[in-house]
Image (cartoon, rainbow, N blue to C red):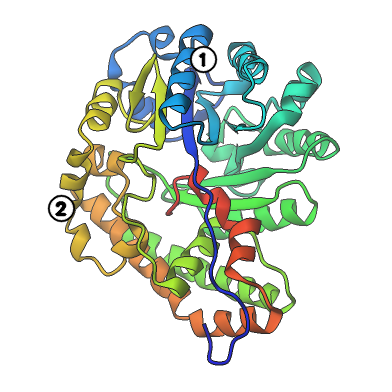
Amino acid sequence: MSKGSKVDYNYKEEKGLIINIFVTGRCNARCKECINQIITDNSNLAPEFLEIDIKRDFSIIQDIIKKHNGLPATICFYGGEPLLEPEKFVPLIELLEQGGYNNSIKYMIYTNGEFLARFFKDYPDIAKKIWIYAVSIDGDEVQHNYYRSGTDLKRIKENLKYVKGNYKNILMWSTLREGQSLMKCFEEFLRLYNDSLVNHFFWHCLETQEDFKDFPAYFKSYTEDLKIIIDYYITQLKKGNLLPIAHINELLLYLITKKERNHTACGAELDTNYDLVGGHILACVDLPFDKGKELKQNPNDILRLKEALGCFKCNIHFYCGGRCPIQVIYGTSLRTRQYCDLLKAHVGIVESRLDEIKSILDEKKITLQDIYNRSAFIVRYTDVTP
């Protein structure tokens, strides 16, 4: 760290299994450019074939945990909208709890937030066992309701207020599409965070098969917004407040320690990551079934995708680890490379303020372990990089 620093900048990361389970294809929302609609559902398989099966998936989870000698696991429920049909996954949690896994398994739900209060009312004990709720919120009410048609931010906030009295671990997850404002997402996060309705923030760019209509305008808007966000982050840090923007905090860990990720950010090729769909293990729950299965069985194919993109020669590969396989396979080559340019700028903006940030961390005696424990730990359960 800085010369003469007395602060310990070593830190330990959580090492455990991640098991994503596809609960249901049903969803009340009609989000613009929904990944399930434009990419995942190209499997040409009946939805019920892909969905959770309690006995089958319980057995598979047991086998996975046994294979890894009881390594702690996080079970992540995915959709569609899982809370539309909680009766499909609640019995699995009950089975795991009864099976003696209550101390070695945590649970996470990805949700649009529309049914959170109902879930807490209908299944109060189970709802409180969930470690993290990742709630999709894409800006202020006007922006969110436009891009996530079928949901209503005002109603989601009411749900979060109800949950607040019972629970305290909510991740706000924003998906950025062309035409959306990152700043509006950030400002909404601040409102919710200051009201103690969310605890963490992450944003990422949409995976899509369409090219940008005006990438220079998108690039300009994104980078200008990010500079303002980093200014605010530093202002808060000077007050001793570590703003819980998960991927910014993780990036700082990489920049300070100069460590290497050594795998794609999402970990699709790792033996510790499992995406369970229709009783099969896929490389990614968002991929069409056959392609996801093929990539999981042949993880070196993911490395070949990185070679084709030139990832190993890229100056941010140490952090990025390679672009999302979904975007590389199903997106256009142009958009994929534009995302690479955007992420390089993203890293550069944060890195340009690194000396200042390191100095404040020293002054406030905020260690890298603090950054990890308070915020960066949650990155593993997101798309990791924007």
Type of residue at label 1? Answer: Phe
- The location of residue 380, given as percent across then percent down, is 49, 47
Q: Mark 2 or mark 1: which comes first in sequence?
A: 1
The residue positioned 48% from the left and 70% from the top of the image is: 224
Is residue 66 or residue 107 the one in the foreground?
Answer: 66
| Quadrant in which the C terminus is drawn | bottom left
- The location of residue 358, given as percent across then percent down, is 56, 81
Q: Quadrant of residue 295?
A: top left
Q: Nearer the viewer, mark 2 or mark 1?
A: 1
Q: Which residue is mark 2?
A: 307
- The location of residue 248, given as percent across then percent down, is 52, 63
Task: Determine the CA span between mark 2 and mark 1.
Answer: 37 Å
**Vertical side of 8 occupied by 42: above or below:** above
**Vertical side of 170 occupied by 217: above or below:** below
Task: Please say whether residue 352 is visible from this viewpoint.
Answer: yes
Is residue 161 or residue 126 the one in the foreground?
Answer: 126
Estimate how packed mark 1 is, as few (under 14), some (14 to 19) or many (20 or more) residues with alpha carbons within 10 Å.
some
The residue positioned 55% from the left and 34% from the top of the image is: 74
**Vertical side of 284 occupied by 98: above or below:** above
Q: Secondary structure at mark 2?
A: helix
Question: Residue 207 — which label?
Answer: none
Residue most toward the bottom?
4
Type of residue at label 2? Answer: Glu
Task: Please say whether residue 210 is visible from this viewpoint.
Answer: no
Question: Residue 58 — which label?
Answer: 1
The residue positioned 75% from the left and 30% from the top of the image is: 128
Estimate how packed mark 2 is, as few (under 14), some (14 to 19) or many (20 or more) residues with alpha carbons within 10 Å.
few
- The location of residue 35, given as percent across then percent down, is 39, 32
The reply to whether the C-beta atoms of the residues labelled 2 and 1 are less than 8 Å apart is: no
**Vertical side of 22 occupied by 335: above or below:** below
The residue positioned 49% from the left and 19% from the top of the image is: 62
